[in-house]
Image: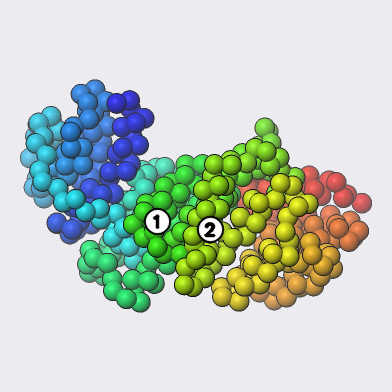
Amino acid sequence: MTAPAVEDLLRALAPQVLGTLVRRHGQFEGCEDAVQEAVLAATVQWPAEGVPDNPRGWLVTVASRRLIDQMRSDHARRERESATAAEVVPEDVPGTDDTLLLLFLCCHPTLTAASQTALTLRAVGGLTTAEIARAFLVPEATMAARISRAKQRIKAAGSSFSLPDGAEREERLRVVLHVLYLIFNEGYTASSGSELHRVDLAHEAIRLARMVHGQLPGDGEVTGLLALMLLTDARREARTTAAGDLVPLAEQDRTTWDRGLIDEGIELVKASLGAPALGPYQLQAAIAATHADAATAEETNWPQVHALYLILERIAPNPMVTLNRAIALAETEGPAAGLELLSTLDGDERMAGHHRLLSVRAHLLERTGDTAGAYELYRRAAKATASIAEQRYLESRAGRVRP
């Protein structure tokens, strides 16, 4: 097996192995370190000597021995490392996959959203601390401290490695989905830096969402989130020019959209809408599917998009939902109607100076003919975002309407 194939296999197996160890031994932090060492040993050994017949059992065995070594002196651990990696007899491994439980643990309610995201990427996604730090543009030491604090909080909370019951389980699942949503959004539209996309983060979020969907295929919101990710990621290649400049949805070459992802996403949307209740991810996926159904921007069913945003606004009020509804309203009733709806966000502290509110208002002012007002807001929006790709785009829009 090639080294890249081994890496893909290890990325899929690592959370399963970690789940097994945590179930057996507890002490999440020690188990996670042991699994990382076992994965490192496999990365070196498997491409050269071949993948074992039972790769998961091999990793569980090596990681278990690493964990025992960690409990002893550093000297004893170093003496055993080479022999352990070289001669492994896989022990019996339960057939259950505890990855979903591991996700629940990483999304423990005592953690902040930032810590939940970092710990999920580290323990379940298999990213190194350095990779996570680079993705979120913080020093590695800062990210290491964040992850360490998260582990300590979980330990202090005395959380058991089991699925919670009833309403608590549903609440924790919503947190898991929110964390995956945040990871995907950061990968699809980076909040800062020179690149618009961080493809590795977006693909990792999709992989984890597929895994959760595989274990909970009947959950409408799980299905809706996966559909939303696929339908959104299908447009990725069309979102930038060869020079890396942002291309808005209305101007994208839709022939470059990934039809395979779109077809899969639309089927998932249909399945999700058959659930007993509607949630925000199902509705967002339905909106994405409506855009995907249109061969051109002009053919978009904007009344349907607006209706879906109205429902979404009622069940999950959020200023970003209102902002997006204003865009749809402007397409159905004109820019003045969109601007009137945007004015309801002016008193929302969460949107004060937000580049998205500034840029949408600028766009609608431009459509009304107020180019001077649009110019000022495009310039302000460009200064308000840390994304260089978005800065360039907004500056170019300002240049087009410069008085």
Q: Give the x, y percent position of residue 6.
A: 31, 32
In front of the other: 115 or 139: 115
Residue at image point 32% right, 43% down: 12
Residue at image point 72% right, 59% down: 301
Check disc 1 and report the residue beneath it. Answer: 213
Is residue 29 something that shows in the picture? no
Q: Give the x, y percent position of residue 152.
A: 27, 62
Check disc 2 and report the residue beneath it. Answer: 269
In the image, what residue type sits under mark 2? Answer: Val
In the image, what residue type sits under mark 1? Answer: His
Gap between marks 2 and 1 measured at Cα: 13 Å
In the rendered image of this protein, does residue 133 appear above or below residue 174? above
Q: Quadrant of the N terminus?
A: top left
Q: Give the x, y percent position of residue 138.
A: 47, 49
Quick one: label 2 or label 1, which is nearer the N terminus? Answer: 1
- Give neighbour class at mark 1: few <14, some 14-19, many 20+ (Cα, 10 Å): some
Question: Relative to 145, is 72 on the left or the right?
Answer: left
- Give neighbour class at mark 2: few <14, some 14-19, many 20+ (Cα, 10 Å): many
* Extreme residue toward the top, this view: 48
Question: Relative to 47, is 368 on the left or the right?
Answer: right
**In the structure shown, which secondary structural element does the residue marked by tag 1 occupy?**
helix
Q: Give the x, y percent position of residue 219.
A: 41, 64
**In the structure shown, which secondary structural element does the residue marked by tag 2 occupy?**
helix
Residue at image point 46% right, 64% down: 220
